[in-house]
Amino acid sequence: MNSSNFTKWVACWGNATSITDRKECVYAKDITLRYPIYMPFAGSKLRLRFSNLTGTEPVTLSKISIRRMAKGENFIKLLPQTILPDKEVTSEEVECTINAGDTIEVSIYLADCTQMNAGTLITGPLSKGQYAYGNFAEAEELPLDLSRHTNWFYFLNTIDILTEEKNHALVCYGDSITAQSWPDYLTLRARENNYNNVAIIRRAVSGTRILRQYDCITYQAYGLKGATRFPIEMDVAGASAVIIQHGINDIIHPVGTDVNPFRPWSDMPTLEDLEKGTKEIYVDYIRNHPELKHLKVYSGTLLPIYGWRTYNEERDRLRVAFNEWLRTSEIFDGCVDFDKALCDPDHPLCFAPGFDSGDHLHPSEKAYNAMAGAVPAELLQ
């Protein structure tokens, strides 16, 4: 491995930042967060971005360390970081020999009382964190009796690697469908099929909508609306394309204030609202920013919702019509037809057998794998 070939910064892992679920306790102290991160390609340096975008108080990361997940590997210590509210910070660049296929551990120790207001829930075979009570940022293993697993990823937003010019990042942007497993399965698909030059960057928040956001603690974790999120989340070094699979929550959330005071019928979009929002907030934003104009923009169709608790025929007609626009509009460079990949051919408004998680909205793990399989190889090569 010749480090002189490493001349380009590329995002090798990424997450969105949202407001965490508002529970009784929103502060932590004397706690270690640890996140394993798969590294898709080799490099010689790393830099980490941390986000307090949705915080209302400064956050201090007292200790930050990185190491390859192997017995006896040394910890690389980064400088402590203080992140102001509504801000993100990038660490110093650190020398770190990374081989393609390595997994590194990022550990963060929070010594003082810390507002845990900036984090995102993600799941999948490659998205499993841990936390421990106490300072274990430089411990090979977290003590079994003081640690638990978590799928909440706090503060850690993006990892960039100094790598070869041929490597690139593919951004997967969306809501809970994308916050769940299919981006991880896409990473595994790339690895298994020797697409060795791509990193899959997830920018997804459960419950988020294109056109609206919630300003109440009940639904704050449902995230920022598209116009607020997208400019921030498209800060991805080395990105070559983005898949946008977004909009189902705009369709299924409104129920009327007599049912839910935070979900008025006035939030219900028309087809024109969804088309205009997608075009102006996402596609036009990319086309109008010189640093992003090279990106290919792929639409992603919305999945079946038959049987979901707010399902009705009118909502589904809107979903079907929006999907047809996503498939055929010339504003996109292509379409990933997730709906076609997961629906039952004999009953296209429903998931295919084995593809429904049980709630009639979110796919099963088998279906998430099928979503990864639906992504065109040209986006991975």
Image (tube, grey):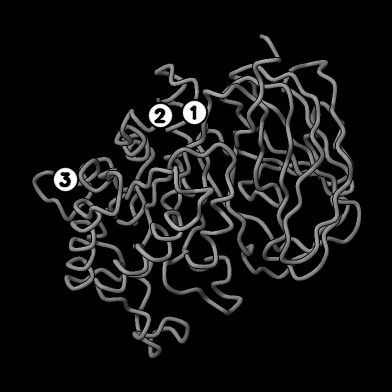
- Amino acid marked by disc 3: Asp
State which tag comes first along the sequence, 1 or 2.
1
Q: Which residue has dot 3 on it?
A: 344
From the viewer's perspective, tell me whether residue 106 is left or right of residue 281. Answer: right
Q: Quadrant of the N terminus?
A: top right
Residue 165 in percent (x, y) is at 57, 24
Secondary structure type for disc 1: strand
* 325 shown above or below 186: below
* 195 shown above or below 257: above
Residue 198 in percent (x, y) is at 49, 28
Secondary structure type for disc 2: loop
Whether pointer 1 and pointer 2 mark residues with C-beta atoms closer than 8 Å, the reply is yes
Question: Which circle marks residue 198 in the picture?
Answer: 1
Q: Which residue has dot 2 on it?
A: 380
Residue at the (64%, 69%) spot, across then down: 22
Query: Closest to the observer: 60 or 359?
Result: 60
Question: Cα distance, mark 2 to mark 3?
Answer: 27 Å
- Amino acid marked by disc 1: Val
Residue at the (51%, 31%) spot, across then down: 168
Question: Cα distance, mark 1 to mark 3?
Answer: 31 Å
Residue at the (71%, 55%) spot, across then down: 51
Secondary structure type for disc 3: strand
State which tag comes first along the sequence, 1 or 3.
1
- Amino acid marked by disc 2: Leu
Question: Cα distance, mark 1 to mark 2?
Answer: 6 Å
